[in-house]
Amino acid sequence: MTLEDTLTIREMCDAYQVTPRTLRFYEAKELLFPIRQGQKRLFTKRDRARLKLILRGKRFGFSLEDIRQLLDLYDMGDQQSTQLRRTYELAQQRLAEMERQRDELNEAIGELNEQIEWGAQMLASMDQKTAAA
Amino acid sequence: MTLEDTLTIREMCDAYQVTPRTLRFYEAKELLFPIRQGQKRLFTKRDRARLKLILRGKRFGFSLEDIRQLLDLYDMGDQQSTQLRRTYELAQQRLAEMERQRDELNEAIGELNEQIEWGAQMLASMDQKTAAA
DNA sequence: AGCTTGCTTGACGTTAACGTAAGCGGAACG
DNA sequence: CGTTCCGCTTACGTTAACGTCAAGCAAGCT
């Protein structure tokens, strides 16, 4: 029974496709805070929510350190406004950075497309030769 | 006089905003092939063309090893079309990957914006309180 | 008791793309 | 001739995000 609604390390691994090493690593980096039952880790609902966000962040190309900062934005209930404001600014910086990255990526996609078309034409002409022979 | 139309390592660095270490590194990785005059490297027109492509490739997020393969696409006079086709496919894969990343990034930007608005409203209400006091 | 299985904590290994420092060889300048 | 540049090679250092042992406890099965 999962009375406490917690998962063992292995259950977490199976559920999220990560290794035990990864989960312990994230704990060491203060991204997760599993509780202990004796020696063993038990991952709570909160840990699962955080892990989802961590994995999403990673797909976006954020570093774990960046992610740790963003995670704090989600948890903050009613902190000092100075602290909140600082985090707010941090989020805006990230956003600007992300938009810049997106724009560069779009530009790169355009250029790469040109290159590919170039290569495609070359391939087409070679195919013609091959077909002729 | 640049009779031979070659650049020294420092001229290259200034021209392309890279360090000497980087150029030597690229040579070691067989991305560039400067000729030698005694001990010193001299970078030819071909090296300059390749370096441009290397730097562009890096902006696209290719690894140096990927780039080395792509570079061969440019040099290939009339190689096997199989090889050319492989490289062409590699570029397309990369493009798909980049588009996927861009889409995820856009999604993330949207979500992050929501969070920020949330935080902004909270800040606004706190400012009102502060002003009232 | 003995063995296996699962989890734990170190601690060292790995990859990419360079940075950085040490030490040496010529060339140019005063 | 001494010093200052510039460049060369060799080689160790760096960062991120884990992988991969090593060694050891605790529980459960037989």
Image: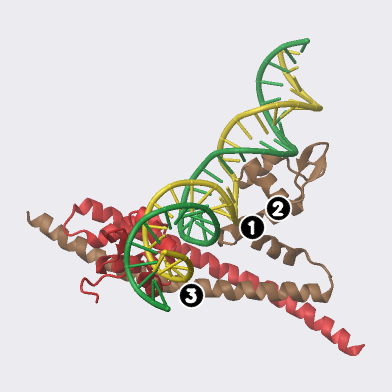
Chain colours: A brown, B red, C green, D yellow
Looking at the image, the residue that sits furthest to the right is: B133
- Where residue B14 appears, as percent x and y from the top left, is 40, 74
Query: What residue is disc 2 on?
Result: A29
Query: What residue is disc 3 on?
Result: A103
Query: What residue is disc 1 on?
Result: A64
On the question of residue A25 being in view, the answer is yes
Mark 2 Cα within 10 Å, few/some/many (few <14, many 20+)? few
Mark 3 Cα within 10 Å, few/some/many (few <14, many 20+)? few
**Subunit under mark 1:** A
On the question of residue A1 being in view, the answer is no
Lateral position of residue A87 relative to residue B18, left or right: right
Which of marks 2 and 1 precedes in the sequence? 2
Q: Quadrant of the N terminus of chain A?
A: top right
Q: Quadrant of the C terminus of chain A?
A: bottom left
Lateral position of residue B75 relative to residue A81, left or right: left
Do callouts 3 and 2 point to residues on the same chain? Answer: yes
Q: Are marks 1 and 2 in contact (CB under 8 Å)?
A: yes
Give above or below for A1 relative to D10.
Answer: above
